[in-house]
Amino acid sequence: MTEPITRLQPKPKPDFISKYLEYTAATECPTFFHRWCGLTSLAAWIGRDIHFPFGHTKIHANMYVMLVGLAGTKKSTAIKIGAKLIKQAGYTKFAAKKTRQEKFLIDLAEDSGLTDETGGMDTDSILDMNLFGTTDVSSLPPAEVFVAADEINNFIGTGNLDFMSILGELWDIDEPYDYKLKNSKSVIIPDPTISILGGNTFVGFNKLFPPEATEQGFFSRMLFIYAEPKGRLYTIPPEPDAELQLELIEQLRLIKKHVKGKVTITDEAFAVLDKIYMSWEGMDDLRFDSYENRRSIHLLKIAMLTMACRLSTTIEASDIIEANTILTFTEHLMPKALGEFGQSKNSGVTHKVMEVLGAAHRPLRFQAIWKAVHQDLENRNQLVELIGNLILAEKIQQVAGSDGYLPIKRLRKAALADTLDYTLLTLDERELIC
């Protein structure tokens, strides 16, 4: 069963994210990209300030997020705005744009205080301090870092599964991290807390992840955010609202001051969370099987962020509903972020067909589609088969009264409508599906 999202006016919410969307409205970036840049930048800002007890471990607010879209979707612009705002508020713990995994870990150790008073201690000395225990790691502050990389492939490295594996471990670690370097010395990092906000194109995505990456922990810890061009053009983009910018910076500083320590949850919020967890249907796309095991943690992380926007340390039912709305909407779009990654041998051509149809403002006839992909196929019969498969998979439709095709944009009907509120999203965002 599928149904379109009801077109309702969004509810006014004078919180940090709502103000952030207002602050970024006069740009060519998709609103959904801005929402996730605001959330992830806030997660980096909060770092390890708050924690939610979760069995034998704790959940922190840090997030791994990757914006995926066509070249020209303004992913870099959205990422830079979010990173710049928290920098203006005083955040300094940014990762290098390009690094190696061992250098990244050593930088984390240095950042947490494993240096001399002048900050001039060399790498060997830092390693020796770790190796021989001359520093009480537990007394050091958390090693926090924000990877704001509009070209995420430059940071991780193409197909670098080893680095991805390490980053996967660090997503939810709740203790010092001990890593043995190639020279047999160890570097111990106190309570690493990493947030990642990266950008990628479909081509870059396929270069970054080998097919086997879907089975890896890093892949299931990453949220892939898809959006289409906003359609609004600015010959000269307007300057940001200075007053609104100051209000956002002040809100960030208030969050840093007041949102600290253990996070609690109300009985009403727990009831909603329990209902979602016990009845969630899962995703139809098999590529996200491993993601499903961590879905509840992603949900709680987002709820902690919506809670922080209210300067609170108690998760309320409204936080769970808002978090579930954002996450559910994201999940419906995540298969589009992956394109045909990890699928059939003609996945590249299939994705190109979906791109062409997705960008069309009217039904496209077979001849127009063939012009776009004829260099990628041996003959027209292959395109006939490909289009037939897409129709059977309910990805595209032949428009009644014409011989043209358009993609099917739908949102799967929620099993529990009372755990979702799409009026919390803007009309621009809901346009991605309805």
Image (spheres, rainbow, N blue to C red):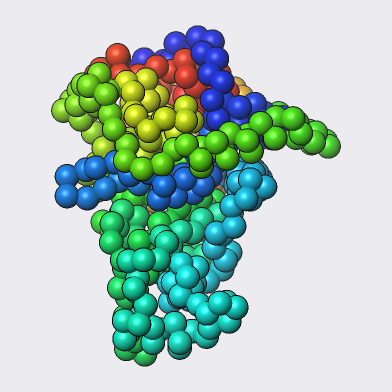
- Vertical relation: 119 (above or below) 18: below
- Vertical relation: 347 (above or below) 396: below
Q: Nearer the viewer, residue 201 or 290?
A: 290
Tell me where residue 296 appears, x and y as whole percent.
26, 37
- At a point 47% along the width and 40% down the height, the residue shown is 225
Asked which quadrant contains residue 367, the reply is top right
Q: State the residue lying farthest toward the right.
A: 236
Q: How many marks?
A: 0
- At a point 50% along the width and 77% down the height, the residue shown is 115
Left-right relation of 365 to 141: right
Q: Nearer the viewer, residue 374 or 162?
A: 162
Tell me where residue 403 appears, x and y as whole percent.
51, 21
- Vertical relation: 156 (above or below) 245: below
- At a point 41% along the width and 60% down the height, the residue shown is 142
- Vertical relation: 115 (above or below) 146: below
- Residue 315 visible (yes or no): yes
Q: Nearer the viewer, residue 163 or 382?
A: 163
Left-right relation of 202 to 175: right
Tell me where residue 325 appears, x and y as whole percent.
38, 25
- Residue 385 visible (yes or no): no
Tell me where residue 299 appears, x and y as whole percent.
32, 35
Left-right relation of 433 to 236: left
In the rendered image, which quarter contains the N terminus?
A: top left
Asked which quadrant contains residue 126, the reply is bottom left
